Image (spheres, rainbow, N blue to C red):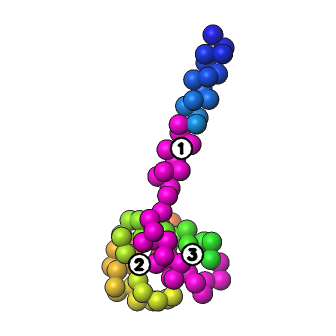
Amino acid sequence: MKLVFATLLLASLVLTCSLFEVTMAASPFCDSRCGQRCSKAGMQDRCLKNCGICCQKCNCVPSGTYGNKHECPCYARIKNSKGRSKCP
């Protein structure tokens, strides 16, 4: 009985991890646009993460490395918990 329970637990853990990775995968469009957007950022890992989140939600990223948020109003509207713009 313990072996069956352990096997089911392990199988569910593996399945959950594999589904999590699929949902967290970014699109090639977002990867390339965020790479350009964050190319001059001081904290690139944070910039790429936030840009990726915003790109997934809005399907667009403003051109350039700063500003131009008028090109993508959805991107400009996303706020963090402090009320500031989440998207770089």
In contact (CB < 8 Å): disc 2 and disc 3: no
| Label 1, label 2: how far apart the Cα atoms are | 28 Å
Label 3's element?
Answer: helix
Residue 24 belongs to magenta span: yes
Please tell me whether mark 1 or mark 3 is closer to you in this view.
Answer: 1
Looking at the image, residue 18 lies above or below residue 3: below
Identify the residue shown where x is 63% and y is 72%.
Answer: 45
Sequence order check, earlier mark of 1 and 3? 1
The residue that disc 2 covers is 61
Q: Residues within 10 Å of mark 1 (few under 14, many from 20)?
A: few
The residue that disc 1 covers is 18
Identify the residue shown where x is 55% and y is 68%.
Answer: 49
Residue 47, numbered circle: 3
Residue type, label 2:
Val
Front residue of 75/64: it is 64
Q: Position of residue 42 (x, y in %)?
A: 65, 83
Front residue of 65/11: it is 11
